């Protein structure tokens, strides 16, 4: 018999539905669903630019951050070029590379789950057009610090565009966080990629954006799908920007639960490195395959990479307690079996 899923902790979604003010804005927009949205999301672009304190010619909006990433590849990559990225990473990147006829160039992570910046640099050659960094990293939650990022950017050849995926940046609390927007003037080959899916809890509405030099942004915008951002999504994003203080409290709650989850898992004997996303990463040689099975039996859907790791989205307190109970039971069973 199939076990029902009680807690969805596989896709790094927010545990919270949209705020009431955001839902109200969405309802108002639905009443006008017989009307087309703007051909291009110029008004939304200006709102995001003002929020980020950059000029609007430095912002491009797309169908989720993955949509902006695809537009970037369509603008820059030709068949036979290579796209480099750490592996494992967000599953979409090899798919996007294949969609534009590029050769994927995966570079193994360092043993501690960090992206190996030296190995990534060594992999770049005359055929490489884009190199992807996820910061914080998906799925391990590791962080590229400000100093490490600056050193990396200085060494990347100018014909290679750096796609800096900051989908989880709102959850990072490290004191050495990069100020990526401050780097845009120095590095015209840098595109900072962000989303409203994670911290803002609007995953179903598919709105992401990129920030870069105006020349790069202009090239990406040429690949923008006409009428591509729907009116309900636009209304939700604008309302979310107005509700920034409320959303910050939600993010702080997720961060506090992440730290509690990590502390409890460590106390149970799991070796969990500090993470900076809205998830916790359990890695081999800990018993992650057995852990995945125990979570499934408890009705928890997690992201399982067999033989490699287990990514647990931080849910609400009830979901996280269910995770801890399931994994505590596994540890207790393994201890008994050794006696």
Image: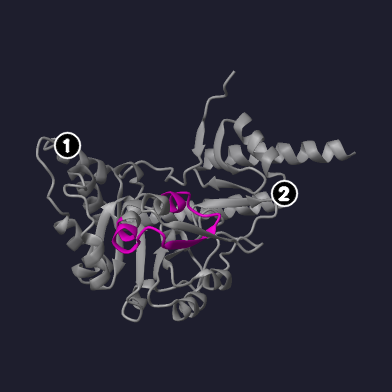
Q: What crowding class fits label 1: few (fewer than 14 Cα within 10 Å), some (14-19), or many (20 or more)?
A: some
Instruction: Residue at 61%, 53% (x, y): give it.
Output: 262
Magenta stretch contains residue 154 = no
Instruction: Residue at 53%, 25% (x, y): give it.
Output: 4
Q: Nearer the viewer, residue 15 or 312?
A: 312
Q: What crowding class fits label 2: few (fewer than 14 Cα within 10 Å), some (14-19), or many (20 or more)?
A: some
Q: Mark on residue 286?
A: 2
- For label 1, the residue is 30
**Dot placed on the residue nearer the N-terminal end, 1 or 2:** 1
Q: In the rendered structure, which segment of residues is drawn in magenta?
A: 71-95
> Relative to residue 93, is residue 154 depicted above or below?
below
Q: Mark on residue 6?
A: none
> Relative to residue 316, is residue 4 depicted above or below?
above
Q: Nearer the viewer, residue 123 or 256?
A: 123
The colour scheme used to paint the residues is: one colour
Residue 130 appears in which quarter of the rendering? bottom left
């Amino acid at each position: 018999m199939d076990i029902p899923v009680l807690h969805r902790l596989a896709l790094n979604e927010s545990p919270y539905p949209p705020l009431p003010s955001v839902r109200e804005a969405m309802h108002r927009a639905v009443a006008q669903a017989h009307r087309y949205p703007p051909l291009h999301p110029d008004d939304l672009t200006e709102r995001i630019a003002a929020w980020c304190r950059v000029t609007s010619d430095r912002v491009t909006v797309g169908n989720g951050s993955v949509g902006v990433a695809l537009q970037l590849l369509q603008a820059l990559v030709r068949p036979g070029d290579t796209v480099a990225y750490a592996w494992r990473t967000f599953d979409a990147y090899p798919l996007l590379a294949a969609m534009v006829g590029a050769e994927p160039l995966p570079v193994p992570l360092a043993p501690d789950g960090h992206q190996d910046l030296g190995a990534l640099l060594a992999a770049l050659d005359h055929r490489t057009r884009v190199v992807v960094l996820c910061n914080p990293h998906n799925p391990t939650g590791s962080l590229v610090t400000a100093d490490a990022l600056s050193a990396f950017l200085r060494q990347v050849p100018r014909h290679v565009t750096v796609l800096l995926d900051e989908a989880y940046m709102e959850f990072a609390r490290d004191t050495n966080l990069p100020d990526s927007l401050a780097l845009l003037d120095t590095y015209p080959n840098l595109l900072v990629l962000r989303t409203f899916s994670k911290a803002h809890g609007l995953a179903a509405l598919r709105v992401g954006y990129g920030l870069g030099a105006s020349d790069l942004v202009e090239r990406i915008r040429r690949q923008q799908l006409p009428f591509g951002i729907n009116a309900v999504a636009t209304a939700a994003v604008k309302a979310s920007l107005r509700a920034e203080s409320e959303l910050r409290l939600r993010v702080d709650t997720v961060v506090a639960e992440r730290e509690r989850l990590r502390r409890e898992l460590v106390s149970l004997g799991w070796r969990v490195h500090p993470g900076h996303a809205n998830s916790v990463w359990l890695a081999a040689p800990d018993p992650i395959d057995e852990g995945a099975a125990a979570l499934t039996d408890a009705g928890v859907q997690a992201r399982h990479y067999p033989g490699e790791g287990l990514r647990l989205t931080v849910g609400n307190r009830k979901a996280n307690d269910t995770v801890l109970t399931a994994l505590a039971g596994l540890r207790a069973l393994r201890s008994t079996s050794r006696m």
